[in-house]
Amino acid sequence: MMKKTEEAKICLPKIIWLLSGIILGAAAVLSFASSGEKLLRIATWLGLSMLATGIANVILYFYCMKQTPGAKWLLADSITAALLSIFPLFNQITSAAAIPFYFCVWDLFSGILRLMESTEQKTAGERGWRWFCIVGIIEILAGCIALIKPVEEVLTMHVTVGLVLLIQAIAFFHKAGVDLIYKMN
């Protein structure tokens, strides 16, 4: 019985991270499919995707991740995502031009936290820390580049938000799959 409980705890993070990746991937597709003018109309859906992943990871942290190296950075990232989702969800006065800002800040902050998580994983001797470091660097670069006004104008707002959401989705897919890769080797 104890073994099944431990397996469930190991499996739960992968399921939550896969679902988070799917939710964010769907939000990215929604953002890519809309035009810049419709960004305000879909802001609620984008904010909900951000909120859902934030809440899911907060629950995951308290359920089974407290003792995992780097888990406190997961908690910080989750709380940040949940709090930043409030703006596109409930602030209907926000202009469409401000919406990419919230998603880019989330990407930037998430990248910094993923780098910190990778250093803790390295110190703990865990495998796969380099991939978390690479994903963190990509998130930081994408967040910084997307915040630059000329880049936003070239890509348009909905593409900028879509790229940020896509990078976040890939990060969650990576997080779910990295353990599976190393357990197979």
Image: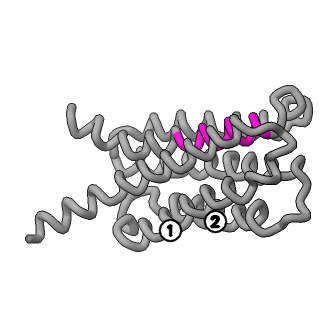
Task: Residue at 39%, 68% (x, y): give it.
Answer: 66
For the view shown, which residue lies furthest in the top direction?
154
Q: Give 171 or 23, whichever is nearer the viewer.
A: 23
Q: Considering the numbered disc 1 on the image, is that residue within a helix, a strand or a loop?
A: helix
Q: Position of residue 137 (x, y in %)?
A: 61, 36
- Please tell me whether residue 141 is drawn above or below residue 4 in the rendered image: above
Res. 115 in view:
no
> Quadrant where the N terminus lies?
bottom left
Amino acid residing under circle 2: Ala
Provide the residue span drawn in magenta. Answer: 158-169
Mark found first going from the N terminus, 2 or 1:
1
86 up-or-down from 131: above or below: below
- Residue plotted at (21% across, 31% down): 185
Which residue, as the protein is rendered here, is positioned at the far left?
1
- Name the residue carrying label 1: 58
**Structural crowding at the residue carrying mark 2, measured as other residues with C-alpha within 10 Å and reported as few (<14), some (14–19) or many (≥20):** many
Residue 113 in the image: above or below residue 128: below
- Name the chief secondary structure element in magenta: helix
Q: Which residue is mark 2?
A: 82
Q: Amino acid at mark 1?
A: Val
Report whether 62 appears left or right of 101: left
List x then y, in percent, for residue 105: 75, 51
The residue at 54%/59% (across/down) is 53
Where residue 30 appears, x then y in whole percent? 65, 42
Measure how far apart labels 2 and 1 are at the Cα level.
9 Å
